[in-house]
Amino acid sequence: MSVASRAPAPSRGAAVTDGTTAEGTRLERAARVIHGSFIDETIAIVARAGEGTISFAVGSPAREALDLAHADELAATVLERDGRSALGYGITEGDDELRDIIADAARRRGIQASAEDVIVTAGGLQAIDIAIRLFIRPGDMAVVESPGFANVLAALRNHGARVLEVPVDTDGLDVAAASRLIAESGASPKVFFVVPNFQNPSGVTLSRARRDALVELAAEHGSIVIEDDPYRELRYRGDDLPPIAAIARDGVVNIGSFSKTFLPGVRVGWAISDRATVKRMAAAKQTMDSCTSSLSQRLVVAFHRDRDFAVHVEALRALYRPKQARAREALAEHFGDVAVRWNDPDGGFYLWVELPDGPSARRLLDAGLARGVAFVPGDAFAIERDLGSSLRFSYASASLADIDEGVRRLRLAYDDILDR
């Protein structure tokens, strides 16, 4: 295997060292450790691996989904209709019309919200980071799903949180286990963080009973619930479940994004909470970027003005549903004779794959890159828990043909590590 095809070890949310000595430069000595995300590192890994590499690593919308937005037409419409106002600064809380659009959609999901309860952010991740800044002080405990969203694990650690990892199963976060682990820790959590629908990375959905139990547990400890819900619209079967913010208005920050349903490159997300919290989040945002891109916000507004969003979502579901089915079929075809397991989520972008005892996902990634296929090892989604025999498989951006070929290559890579 060439050096270029060998991936760095998953950082598990930790900063990756570059081999510099303790003495280093003055900048190196002065800087504190910053935790990053191996998910984002895989973009560079796949780029270095070569043009022919098939990637199941990044949870990015398919090219066909981006084409559905007709962004060139929208941009022309915005510049003609809104002119210079789309190119200047805006208010920190966000474009008034966009906040109305977001609040209206939230009310249809059962969340009591008006435009004043919404802050528009530079993607969902900024909303998450602002919420963590607001509610976490060094030493506070945060309860997270395990496996959990790698970027959030890093953000919590960067803000000094003690992270309590709680396992997920087919019904999402194991709330009973969370209660037990909290009691064993001897401390009350300040924050619970969950991705309730088609969770990143496992794809599982938090059941209605678990949502109710989580609300009760958070209230018992006086904790805040941050629910990150970017995949909600991408349900391929089954019935919608109410957001946690619809079950308990107090103590919940509901976060969403247009990245999965519109265009990730516009970097527009939001948070919904009470008005006092939104005001504090706006103050925190003003130290980051003052306001989310006015042009990006007006693109989202134009999309909702001029297109039928419900029809667009149905088109996305029609695009991704067969990709998920093909991924499961390909895994069954190529791994049906070995003890590899995978789940069957009702929507979203991801499957969670578990290898039998012995081969690690980290070794499989190295072998996979040599064969021209990439994914994210499970270790990237944990801090302390051992998820080394698991991996996240994202089928969203690959074509049906690439899913078939990529899984075939993955089996060849699997056989390669067994033969060593």
Image (tube, grey):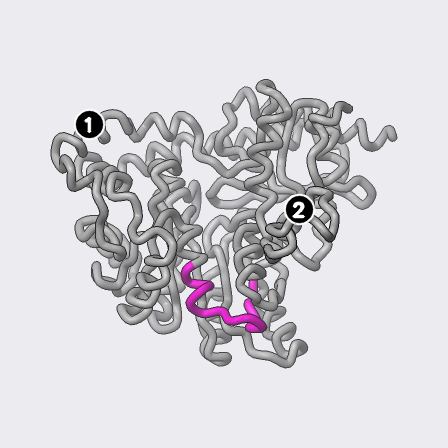
Mark-to-mark CA distance, 2 and 1: 42 Å
Q: Please determine whether, in this image, residue 157 is positioned above or below residue 249.
A: above
Name the quadrant containing residue 234: top left
Which disc number belongs to residue 160?
Answer: none
Name the spot of residue 211 as percent of width and height, x first. Answer: 46, 65
Upstream in sequence: badge 2 or badge 1 = 2
**What residue is drawn where x is 42% and y is 63%?**
131
The amino acid marked with disc number 2 is Val
Name the spot of residue 112 as percent of width and height, x first. Answer: 26, 65
Q: Which residue is mark 2?
A: 16
Q: Which residue is mark 1?
A: 76
364 is within the stretch colored magenta: no
**What residue is drawn where x is 62% and y is 28%?**
330
- Relative placement, left or right, of 330 versus 227 is right
Foreground: disc 2 or disc 1: 2
Magenta stretch, residue numbers: 130-144
Q: Please determine whether, in this image, residue 244 is positioned above or below residue 321.
A: below
Give 159 or 357, whichever is nearer the viewer: 159
Name the quadrant containing residue 358: top right
Q: How many marks?
A: 2
Image quadrant in which the N terminus is located = top right
Q: Please determine whether, in this image, residue 303 is positioned above or below residue 11.
A: above
Image quadrant in which the C terminus is located = top right
